Image: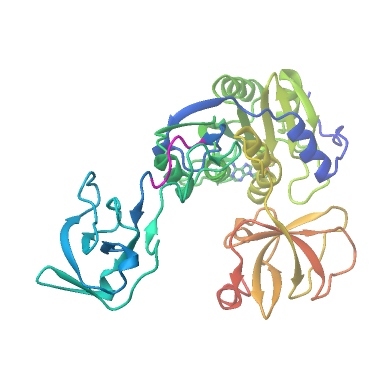
Amino acid sequence: MVRMQASPYPMVAIEEAIAIVLAHTPVLETEEIPIGDADGRVLAERIISADDMPPFDTTSVDGYAIISGEGTAPRRVLSEVTAGQAGGQAVTPGTAIRIMTGAPLPPGADAVVMVEQTSEVDGILHLTEAPPAGANIYRRGQDIARGQEILGPGTVLGAAEIGLLATVGRARVRVYRRPVVAVLSTGDELVEADEPLRPGQIRDSNRPALLASVREAGAIPISLGRVRDDAAEQEAVIRQGLQRADVVLTSGGVSVGSRDLIKPILARLGTIHFGRVAFKPGKPTTFATVGDKLVFGLPGFPVSSLVSFEVFVRPALRKMQGYTTLHRPVLPVRLDRPVVPSVDRPEYQRAIVYWSNGHLLAYPTGAQRSSRLLSLVGANALLRIPPGTMELPAGTVVEAVLLGDIRTAAAADRTAGQ
Ligand code: AMP
Ligand code: MG
């Protein structure tokens, strides 16, 4: 028998829902990988340098290695030492050795004079200035001392960190594993992006959008395809996802319509921890666990599914990967125009935040309907608008969840009035 009825699931607050998700989210195990594959990964070990950097006294300029105590007296140039050479001649009183950046400092020298402050004529070096002892010398261990901890667990590996790992001789590194996230979309009305539309059909936009969100969050997406509104088929595909992935995301079918089948399936397979959130857009967002796997039943409306991913799924994927910062930065911003709140629920309005005359200002990206994906295009923030019946006047300070770079006023103006 098919019937529609009010949701039996209690409405939970956004913060509570996020806390429930994180309480059930494990940090994944670690793995060792080549540093060439490590960007964006989170370090799971302490990195202690086994060497000094630089490993020998060297010079930071091209010039001449000299004895500083001899002032500007002319010196005989003995030879040249370039980067990569070692065990060359020593500088003795009355002499100098031509030296290139990165070459080992010859024994006997206590300063390097820059080539710009010299002239060399017939093998004799003339100095315009006398450098002090230690000038232009880059001492062994000056940047990194042997035994020093240079990176710790929880560090997100980017270009500089990967460079440091190579510097200290680490070609492989221990990081947290990335979660595999399986995505399926539900709905009899859905067709693929390259298919023509027959009456009653729309194209499946949630699956490609969610797969992209999963990848952006650092996880490994796999697509389980589109599934018709048939309980047995949906259950079979969700089971398949649970076998192949750490997390399963479904889209659609979590509301209270007669073809909304996801919640009963998840209740059969595992435990539903919440089935409704006091949140716009995305009220029917559902979270369940099946063993140690997580399942998110995301809403069908395209904006709802992406915003719910952002608010509930992304922090969980980051926790699994060992990130210590799970959430986006939140900043107070000032509305540059009036904003109409939702009457009954806190709303995350898609917005543009920009810097103007010493203030962070913000405006929503046009109509905030949950079907209107264009409201997310170009948005660099979600404004947390508390529920209410009164319009918020321009100048009201609200919280902005920053999704991207803050714009400058000039850049913001180009997209104003969408
Ligand atoms: P549902 O929650 O399944 O009732 O879906 C709510 C609305 O979102 C309906 O208008 C659906 O047609 C639409 N919708 C559901 N799934 C998708 C999808 N994968 N891509 C685009 N729109 C969808
Ligand atoms: Mg549906």
Looking at the picture, how far across and down is residue 107, in whole percent? 29, 50
Q: Is residue 322 left or right of residue 14?
A: left
Residue sitting farthest toward the right: 389
The reply to whether the magenta stretch includes residue 89 is no
Instruction: Using the image as rendered, state which of residue 74 and residue 23 is in the foreground.
Output: 74
Q: Is residue 152 left or right of residue 119?
A: right
The magenta-colored residue range is: 48-54
Figure label count: 0
- Which residue sits at x=67%, y=64%? 351
**Quadrant assignment, res 413:** bottom right
Looking at the picture, how far across and down is residue 356, in whole percent? 66, 78
Split into quadrants, the picture shows ligand 2 in the one at: top right
Looking at the picture, how far across and down is residue 415, in whole percent? 58, 72
Does the rendering let one see residue 321? yes
Residue sitting farthest toward the left: 122
- Which residue sits at x=71%, y=41%? 312
Residue sitting farthest toward the bottom: 357
Quadrant including the C terminus = bottom right
- Which residue sits at x=24%, y=61%? 93
Instruction: Using the image as rendered, state which of residue 328 and residue 265 is in the foreground.
Output: 328
Quadrant including the N terminus = top right
- Which residue sits at x=22%, y=64%? 94
User: Would you place residue 337 above or below residue 213 in this image?
Assistant: below
Looking at the picture, how far across and down is residue 355, in whole percent? 65, 73
Instruction: Using the image as rendered, state which of residue 331 and residue 305 is in the foreground.
Output: 331
**Quadrant assignment, res 337:** bottom right
